[in-house]
């Protein structure tokens, strides 16, 4: 497992002394900075039969199994999509004329119970049993409680790596039983160099849009994602003509992305209203300046707070179209008046 260059030193520090590892690590920080890859690299190193000074050898049977996803002493727990009743049934097709119902990604109690049962078994290779849970905040309350007993009374030679973008959403009882490792954004120069190595020729604007998160920026380089973003921003750049209903209908299945674009756009408008350069969309400087010049600053600040609070609803099965439409109407009221 390859870890990004800005996390290599931390990987070496964590893996230097296997016997000093805790039973549970909580790797927390913003999304898109490689926390999951770091956790996987640490686990592979721990399971490796011929570990090297800087990580797993990548050649032994254990490494081959791990990289193919079938190592018997490793489990990964990630959210699946379920309905609002959390039964886990597949979402039904949307009937014509009805709004799409958003699926709610969750890590459910059944999956956590299966994981804790596995951790009680003897290791197949006579070494460690390992697990990665990410994003850990996607455990519902029952799932988090099911994990507590293992966190409180861990079997010997067990390592659980919890990865979280929002650790505050985890129960305090879970957080307190993990060694917390905070991870921040990498230096801009390092992130840009890494993106160029991934084949992105002009990564500056993508990294700016992602707020400094290189993996998010790399995902945003997808042509279809870029096309949808630019169309959405074109509408925001002309708030007086914004058709909130039509735009919400078109982007109803991309609520999280739309919320992110709108939130970052508002942030840039506030900066430009205060005679500061935009942070997230520098290539839209002229469009933003024109909107910011007539927008109500107090209204923008209030709306920014509303959007920040609304972020908590993104994982809930609300009607995405109606929610996005309400935000766009609010935006047009603030920014669309001459």
Image (cartoon, helix red, strand yellow):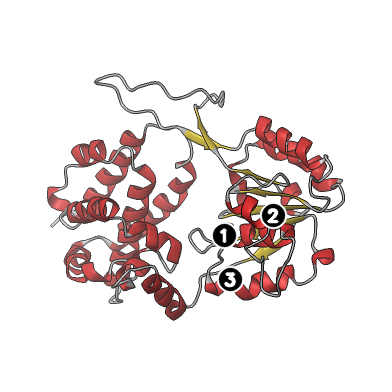
Which residue is labeled 3 in the image? Answer: 7
Closer-to-camera residue (40/205): 40
87 sits left or right of 188 in the view? right
Please report the residue visible at 30 percent of the width from the left and 70 percent of the height from the top. Answer: 205
Percent across and percent down for residue 178 are 75, 56
Q: Of the residues under marks 3 and 1, which one precedes in the sequence?
A: 3
Q: Viewed as shown, does residue 42 lie left or right of 101?
A: right
Residue at disc 3, secondary structure: helix
Residue 335 image position (x, y, % from top left): 22, 56
Q: Is residue 153 above or below residue 176?
A: above
Q: Quadrant of residue 261?
A: bottom left
165 or 72: nearer the viewer = 72
Residue at the farthest bottom position: 189
Q: Which residue is mark 2?
A: 62
- Quarter of the image where the N terminus is located: bottom right
Could you tell me if the residues under marks 3 and 2 are in contact, i.e. CB atoms within 8 Å? no
Q: Is residue 303 above or below residue 281?
A: above
Q: Which mark is residue 310?
A: none
- Count neighbours of disc 2 (C-alpha within 10 A) and say few if under 14, some if 14 to 19, many if 20 or more: many
Mark 2–mark 1 Cα distance, whole angstroms, equals: 17 Å
Q: Which residue is mark 1?
A: 37
Q: What is the x, y in percent for residue 196?
A: 36, 73
Q: Quadrant of the C terminus?
A: bottom left
Q: Is residue 279 above or below residue 249?
A: below
> Left of 89 or right of it: where is 305?
left
The residue that appears at 71% across and 60% down in the rendered structure is 48
Q: What is the CA distance from the residue labelled 3 to the residue labelled 1?
A: 9 Å
Marks 3,1: beta carbons within 8 A: yes
């Amino acid at each position: 497992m390859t870890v990004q260059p800005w996390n290599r030193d931390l990987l070496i520090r964590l893996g230097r002394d296997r016997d000093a590892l805790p039973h549970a690590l909580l790797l927390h920080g913003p999304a898109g900075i490689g926390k999951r890859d770091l956790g996987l690299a640490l686990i592979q190193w721990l399971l490796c039969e011929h570990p090297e000074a800087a990580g797993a050898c990548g050649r032994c049977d254990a490494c081959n199994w791990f990289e193919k996803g079938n190592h018997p002493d490793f489990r990964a727990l990630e959210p699946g999509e379920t309905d609002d009743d959390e039964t886990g049934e597949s979402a039904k097709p949307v009937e014509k004329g009805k709004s799409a119902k958003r699926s709610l990604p969750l890590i459910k109690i059944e999956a956590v119970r299966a994981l804790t049962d596995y951790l009680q078994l003897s290791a197949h290779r006579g070494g460690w049993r390992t697990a990665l849970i990410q994003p850990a905040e996607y455990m519902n309350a029952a799932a988090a409680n099911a994990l507590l007993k293992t966190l409180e009374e861990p079997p010997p030679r067990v390592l659980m790596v919890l990865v979280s973008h929002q650790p505050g959403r985890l129960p305090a009882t879970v957080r307190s039983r993990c060694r917390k490792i905070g991870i921040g954004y990498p230096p801009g120069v390092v992130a840009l160099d890494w993106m160029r190595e991934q084949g992105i020729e002009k990564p500056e604007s993508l990294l700016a849009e992602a707020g400094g998160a290189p993996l998010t920026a790399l995902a945003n380089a997808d042509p279809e994602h870029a096309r949808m973003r630019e169309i959405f921003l074109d509408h925001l750049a002309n708030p007086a003509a914004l058709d909130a209903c039509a735009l919400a209908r078109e982007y109803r299945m991309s609520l999280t992305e739309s919320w992110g674009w709108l939130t970052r756009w508002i942030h840039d408008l506030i900066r430009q209203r205060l005679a500061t350069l935009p942070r997230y969309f520098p290539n839209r400087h002229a469009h933003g300046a024109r909107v910011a010049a007539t927008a109500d600053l107090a209204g923008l600040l209030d709306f920014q707070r509303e959007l920040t609070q609304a972020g908590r609803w993104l994982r809930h099965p609300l009607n995405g179209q109606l929610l996005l439409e309400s935000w766009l109407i609010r935006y047009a009221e603030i920014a669309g008046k001459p």
